[in-house]
Image (cartoon, helix red, strand yellow):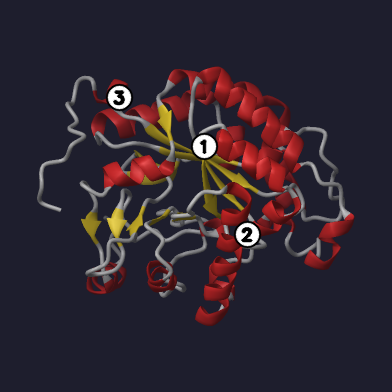
């Protein structure tokens, strides 16, 4: 960790030199956390599958901008759309794991989690022809309740995870986690790359994409990414879902109002905002970014986790 980084940053031009991490969480419209209490998994196969058409539009958008990305994909989706997975891989993008069927990590036992990521990885590797080295937990569900998941990821040979949202949020979050890449296990090479947050008024605010990107003005995301690139001299990590560019998707009428607002707001504006984003900033795959960030990552093993959690501080 003390060797000189092969990716030096210089302050004035850092934002023009840094390639940010672009990622897509590949799941269909009915597999989201907002609807997990109203749409049963047993009903999924009877619902309209829209993910392949949406991914096709995303691939065209990325190709137009010359951007490469990582597609964190559910094993359930890959099993039903193997040709889509191969198309993503053949276009030069990374395929990574999003688990099998979007169950949150803290709902598993360690044994169940081990089987979930093993199953998803086998399907993804068979479909893509790529070695799967990256993982993102559904709903960023690695937090204080599920830190044991890092051990299983390391045991199964994953090189990086992007599973932590270092904020306080009613849906997810581990606010004591570092904002930027860290090694969660002492003596292991596994890297955790949290989704991006910015600092506003001395507090962390979510700025990594998804619903925040859809709902807030585009100027906010531009400001946040520039802050991370210029002030912190680090790459931003951005994510979104294929269903977010699909205003014609079915409506779930029996979902809570709050869930419907989060899910459906500004779907018709998302594709245009994404086009602006991928053209304005430099973007790359998460595996390439992980190789870079390993030089800058902090050690944040069990002792440090406990110390920061006990103090109530943020790092």
Q: Quadrant of residue 303?
A: bottom left
- In front here: 266 or 201? 266
Vertical placement of residue 117 versus 6, above or below: below
- Disc on the earlier residue, 3 or 2: 3
Q: Quadrant of the C terminus?
A: bottom left
User: SS class of the residue under badge 3?
Assistant: helix
- In front here: 127 or 101? 127
Q: Residue at x 39, y 33 (%)?
A: 20
Q: Are marks 3 and 1 in contact (CB under 8 Å)?
A: no
- In the rendered image, which residue does mark 2 sit on? 123
- In the image: residue 166, left or right of residue 17: right
Q: Residue 194 placed where, x, y %?
A: 39, 51
Q: Which residue is drawn at 32% across and 34% down?
A: 228
**What separation in Å lies between label 1 and label 2 (alpha carbons)?**
17 Å
- Give the number of the disc on residue 93: 1
- Disc on the earlier residue, 1 or 2: 1
Q: Residues within 10 Å of mark 3 (few under 14, many from 20)?
A: many
- In the rendered image, which residue does mark 3 sit on? 15
Q: Residue 270 placed where, x, y %?
A: 65, 29
Q: Do the residues labelled 3 and 2 touch (CB within 8 Å)?
A: no
User: SS class of the residue under badge 1?
Assistant: loop
Q: Residue 292 placed where, x, y %?
A: 28, 42
User: SS class of the residue under badge 2?
Assistant: helix
Q: Residue 234 placed where, x, y %?
A: 28, 37
């Amino acid at each position: 960790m003390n060797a000189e980084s092969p990716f030096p940053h210089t302050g004035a031009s850092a934002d023009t030199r840094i390639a940010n991490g672009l990622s897509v969480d590949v799941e269909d419209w009915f597999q989201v956390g907002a609807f997990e209490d109203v749409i049963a998994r047993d009903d999924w196969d009877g619902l309209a599958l829209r993910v392949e058409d949406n991914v096709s539009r995303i691939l065209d958008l990325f190709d137009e901008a010359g951007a490469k990305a990582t597609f964190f994909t559910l094993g359930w989706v890959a099993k039903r759309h193997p040709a889509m997975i191969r198309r993503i891989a053949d276009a030069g993008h990374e395929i990574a794991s999003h688990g099998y069927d979007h169950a949150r990590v803290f709902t598993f036992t360690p044994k169940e989690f081990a089987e979930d990521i093993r199953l998803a990885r086998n399907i993804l590797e068979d479909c893509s022809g790529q070695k799967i080295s990256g993982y993102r937990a559904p709903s960023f569900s690695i937090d204080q309740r599920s830190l044991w998941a890092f051990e299983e990821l390391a045991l199964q040979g994953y090189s990086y995870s992007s599973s932590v949202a270092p904020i306080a949020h009613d849906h997810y979050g581990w606010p004591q986690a570092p904002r930027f890449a860290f090694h969660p296990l002492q003596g292991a090479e596994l890297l955790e790359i949290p989704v991006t947050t910015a600092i506003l008024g001395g507090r962390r605010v979510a700025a990594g994409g998804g619903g925040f990107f859809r709902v807030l003005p585009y100027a906010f995301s531009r400001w946040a990414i520039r802050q991370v690139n210029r002030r912190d001299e680090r790459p931003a990590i951005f994510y979104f879902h294929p269903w977010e560019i699909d205003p014609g998707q079915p409506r779930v009428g029996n979902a809570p109002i709050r869930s419907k607002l989060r899910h459906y707001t500004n779907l018709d504006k998302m594709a245009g905002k994404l086009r602006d984003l991928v053209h304005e900033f430099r973007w790359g795959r998460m595996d390439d970014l992980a190789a870079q960030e390993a030089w800058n990552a902090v050690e944040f093993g069990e002792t440090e986790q406990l110390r920061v959690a006990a103090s109530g501080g943020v790092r």
